[in-house]
Structure formats: structure tokens, C-alpha cells
Image (cartoon, rainbow, N blue to C red):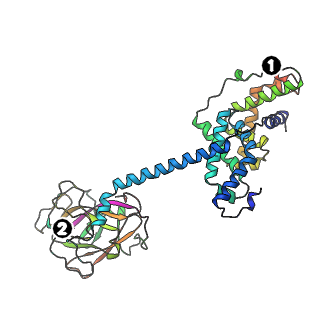
Amino acid sequence: MSMGDQPDVVDSAEAIASFEDFVDGSSARLFTMALLLTGRQRPDAEDLLQGVLERAYGRWRRICRNGDPEPYVRKMLVHASVDRWRRRHHREEPLAAIAASPATGDQTGEIADRDLLLRALALLPAGQRAVLVLRYFCDLSEAQTAATLGCSVGSVKKQASRALAGMRAIVGPAVEPESSTRGNEAVS
Amino acid sequence: MSDLERRLRAAMLAATERPPANLLQEVRRRHRRHVRRVSAACAAVVAALAIAVPPIAHALRTGPQPQIHPAGPATTPTAPANPAGTCQPDAGALTATWRDGSLQAGPIWFAYARIQGYVHLSGAPDAPRSAHRGTGQFAVGVMIVEVGYGSRAVLTVAPGARAYFRFLNGFAKGSSYSLADGVDSLTLAGCPPGTPPGDNGRVSDYYLGFVIRIGSDAPAVVSTPASTRPVQVLFTCLRPGCDT
């Protein structure tokens, strides 16, 4: 459903239907994004997404006038997650706390590696995490990421570079090789 | 793209989870709660205004008082029917240079009006260009008026402004005069010429209040027996408190 085709003035019934369609179609993507932004804290992700959708619902007609509402909601989600992180005075866990689970075999090793990476992602500051989520989960370019975050492309590059450096520091160089046992090596 | 970036992307894409089944219901529930809270907040604001506004509402409901004098140029001030009957040379000391920041209109001075901006000479560069419709809210302002010894002036609000501007009784404790709240015209008189100077010089002090619709301009006229050309002024208030 193309929101850009919506008329300027959408009556209430249309707006409600349009909002419900949007939630049906985008909730999986947005919820996963919320999970990544909150460091895979499911209750936090649910609360974050509900709060953002509630605010979007209140201004739905205005959001739809600007075309596809998903980028706007995505932007709200990112800003809300950063605000929430700031309010909570987030404290990082010690690195030892994110050691990967023991895993054997190719598939389990891959799963352990993903788990390790996502746990490392969760330890990054919210701003850096948001950059990585927008770049690699939402597949946005640096310019699109900058537009979403309301900052410069240079700032996005710097944040991404710092975030990846932080990830490397957390997961350690031992997991860089494409070995199926890298998850185990990271633990040791 | 580095190996880490590729693996991170794969990890993120593989992390897809189903959203909670009741997402939409929760959003609606939150929205209803939000609407209720906003409504309650609005009701609280209205209630607070209803409590705070009675003096203003009273002033506006009171309507013309017996003391009201007809407005118009070259009106000869009548016998004092309000504060003018008193002589207060020492109601309170202003700063030594109070005249610098004050606005003179005939024999009266609106103390610090040039600084606080609650009244302007009509047609002056800093005067409001045109009457505004106002915000619908009313504000109470205070002003100190000084009247030269031996002078008398009538301050009258234009008939068109009487719906949204009235004078209120003085705010200074111990004032020896009493003004009926809500009047739109008053007579101010200075002490007799032989009176010793007070703290602020050879002037009598009047501490007055007024109520005005925020954002509106209220034209008024200062007329004196000796003057054939009354001085026109504009009372204004741009925000609650009127910066006075």
C-alpha cells in the first residue's frame, strides 16, 4: 500500500485503517529493529515499539501526507531508543559477561557467533548501536542514516567506525577468521 | 565491507522475531490512556484558571461604575470620585532616575513604562501598530502612576476597549485611596502645590492595577483641565504578567 498516494486529508476511518495496515505490514521489521536497538531486551523492545506507534497513531494523517510512513516511524524508533538509553544512564556490562555459549559443529558455531555479535552490539552506546542497525539491518546508505539520525554523513562515518572498533574490541580478534569454532575461541 | 560487517548484517537479519500478537491492542490502549491524561491535564488547567480568574471576571462583569466619566477630548475633569481625593507623596520610593525609564503623558508619569512596555504613547515608534484580537486570555498588570503636584488628569479608556480593559484597585498596602475594581475611567490628582516633596520628588504616588486581554491594545486618553489636546496612550499586554 503506497502511502504516498494518500490524499492530503484522510478522514478518521481511513486513517485508522491505514494505520492498522501499516502495523500489520511493518510490525515484524520494526519489532526486530526495536529488539536490536534495545540490546535484545524483549520487554524493552515491546515497550519502545508500542510507545512509538502510539505517538505515530496520534499524528498519523500528518505522517502519511509525507509519503511512506515507515522511514518516519523508523526515525521515531531510533530517537526514542537513544532517549531511553540516556534516561536510564546505561552502564556497560563488563566484557567477560558476554562470552559466547559453547558450541560445536558448523551450524551451532554460526549461531553462537551471531549471538556473540548481537550481545556485543547491545553493549555499544545507543547512538553507535543505532548507526549499525540503520546501516546493516535497515540497509540504509550513510546519507540516509545521517538523514534519519539528523546528523552529518561525517558523523555517521565516525560513529560507525567507532562502533565497529568497539565491536572488534568486545568480540576480540580471535573470532575474525571464518572458522566454525570462532565462537569457542572467543570464550577461551 | 569487512568480514565483521558481513557477519553483523547476517546476525541482524537472522534475529528477526515475531512481534507480540496484541501489539495493535496495546497501542490503542496506550492511546486511550494518553487521551485521558491529556484531557485530565486540560481540565486541571481550566480549573486552575477558574480559580485564578475570578478577580478578572468580576472586574469585567461589574461593568460601568458610578465613578465613570465620559471619555472624549477636552473633557474637563470632574470632582475626584476615586483616588484623586487623596494625596500620597510618600507611598514608596522609586529609584533616583525613575523618570528616565518612565512615560510622561501630560502631568502624569507611568513609572518604568518605557522599560516594562505596558503603556505607550499612541503613534510612538514603539507603540503597537494596530489593535489585535488578543488570545482570549486575560492578565492582570500593575503600574505606578505619578502625578505632579497641583495637577489633575482624567484617564479614560476608549469605549471600544472597555470589553477587555478595566482598572483595578491599588496593589500597595496602606494606600489611602480605594478604587472600585473594574472602572474604565479614573481621575488622578497631585498633592497641593505647597506640599513638601516626597521620596520621588514633587509628585503623588498611585499604585494601580489593570486587567487586559492578552495581546490586545487598549487605547486610553489622558485629559487635563489645562490642556486642549488630550494625550492618547495605548495599554498593552503581550503575555501573562505583562512584564510589569
Subunit that carries the residue with mark 1: A
Q: Does residue A70 appear in this view? A: no
Residue sitting at x 80%, y 30%: A114
Q: Which residues are magenta?
A: B133-147
Q: Residue B203 magenta-drawn?
A: no
Residue A150, placed above or below residue A66: above
Per the image, label 1 sits on a secondary structure element best described as loop
Q: Quadrant of the C terminus of chain B?
A: bottom left
Percent across and percent down for residue B138 are 37, 62
Percent across and percent down for residue A47 are 63, 38
Residue A81 quadrant: top right
Percent across and percent down for residue B238 are 41, 63
Q: Residue furthest top?
A: A188
Residue A127 quadrant: top right
Is B191 on the left or on the right of B231, as rendered?
left
Which residue in the protein does label 2 denote?
B82
Q: Residues within 10 Å of mark 1 (few under 14, many from 20)?
A: some
Q: In the image, are marks 2 and 1 on the same chain?
A: no
Which of the pair B86/B166 is nearer the observer? Answer: B166
Q: Give amino acid for label 2.
A: Asn
Which residue in the protein does label 1 denote?
A102
Residue sitting at x 73%, y 47%: A24
Residue sitting at x 67%, y 37%: A45
Which mark is in front, 2 or 1? Answer: 1
Q: Give amino acid for label 1.
A: Pro
As measured in the structure, the alpha-carbon distance from the residue carrying label 2 to the one carrying label 1 is 93 Å
Residue B212 quadrant: bottom left
